[in-house]
Image (tube, rainbow, N blue to C red):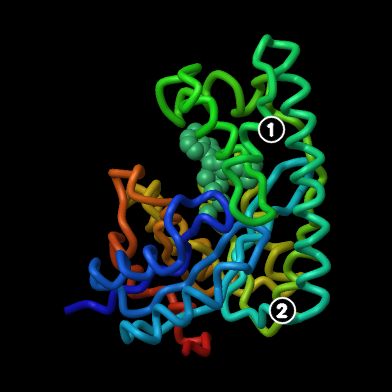
Amino acid sequence: MTFVCDLHTHTAWSDGTLTPTELVARAHAGGVRLLAVTDHDATDGLAEARAAAVRLGIRFVAGVEISATWRRQTVHVVGLGVDPGETRLQAGLARLRARRDWRAREIGARLRRKNIPEAYEHARGLVRGNVVSRTHFAHSLVRRGLVSDLRQAFRQYLGRGCVGDVPVEWAGLEEAIGWICGAGGVAVLAHPTRYRVSSGQLRGLLTEFRAHGGGALEVVCPSHKPADIERMARLACAHELLGSCGSDYHGPEQTWTAPGKLPALPPGVAPVWHALRAA
Ligand code: AMP
Ligand code: MN
Ligand code: MN
Ligand code: MN
């Protein structure tokens, strides 16, 4: 059997819907042997996830997915094997969560002008920890019957160019990588095909990412077709980056994916998990 590894997942401590214990149980049921939990801008779920992983005999990697801004674009940097107690990392994440809250109030104000009152309050009511995400707005719009599903919520209200698309200055790329490396982790550029950049710009992003200490590229993720995987594998090699794989799982409502349900990393790429210390 092949080694099943999933290094990008979310819990209800950010915008996922499962508790850490439930997420780890699903990963275990799906045959995952090495799991990273990588909530957006928060590490609150890691202790519970680690305990559940130890109980079930899954190797566990403490992670985080940091929101960063590169040339006015939002990019996501996953940190793998971070020490959640590291002070600079925590101070950085706290700043990002404060920015999230500011943005959420602004989204609420904008939706109010579109005759959707109390959107901030409704979204905030769905938040378990301190991370208020556009996904919480999407869930609340679905619950209020204003859209039929999350996709429509993003298409109509929250996605690029929509009323709820409030620009935010997240962490700088160098800063995000610095927080991760300073906490003993490996920085991974997440879902590289999701950014609206030309192939030349993507190469520029990877060059900067590597120069600032970035260590890996997410070569395998559910949105990557076989040709994308091959292209990202070549880019990882060209930029001397390790390869990562992650489902970006947010919960069972994502019926098209599951923890660990991923194609294999192409043989030419050095796997990031060889560089990780797992519990
Ligand atoms: P935020 O980090 O608060 O800006 O929210 C981004 C999150 O929204 C991502 O991590 C995804 O989980 C989710 N998301 C983004 N686009 C979509 C979409 N079109 N449909 C469903 N969820 C989405
Ligand atoms: Mn998310
Ligand atoms: Mn992401
Ligand atoms: Mn993610």
Q: Which of 247/224 is in front?
A: 247
Q: Is residue 134 above or below residue 88?
A: above
- The local crowd at label 2, few if under 14, some if 14 to 19, many if 20 or more residues have their Cα within 10 Å, is many
Q: Amino acid at mark 2?
A: Cys
- Which residue shows up at 79% across the image and 29% down it? 106
SS category of the residue bearing label 2: helix
- Report crowding for label 1: few under 14, some 14 to 19, many 20 or more residues within 10 A (C-alpha): some
Asked if residue 182 lies left or right of residue 225, the reply is: right
Could you say which quadrant of the image residue 125 lies in? top right
Helix or strand or loop: what does disc 1 sit on? Answer: helix
Q: Give the residue at x 47% y 89%.
A: 279
Q: How many numbered circles are shown?
A: 2
Could you tell me residue 91's position as x and y percent? 83, 68
Query: Is 99 placed above or below 4 here?
Result: above
Give me the disc on residue 60. none
Q: Which residue is mark 1?
A: 121
Q: Amino acid at mark 1?
A: Glu
- The disc at residue 181 is 2
Q: Is label 1's Cβ within 8 Å of ligand 1?
A: no
Q: Mark 2 and mark 1: span between their CA atoms?
A: 36 Å
Q: Is residue 194 visible?
A: no
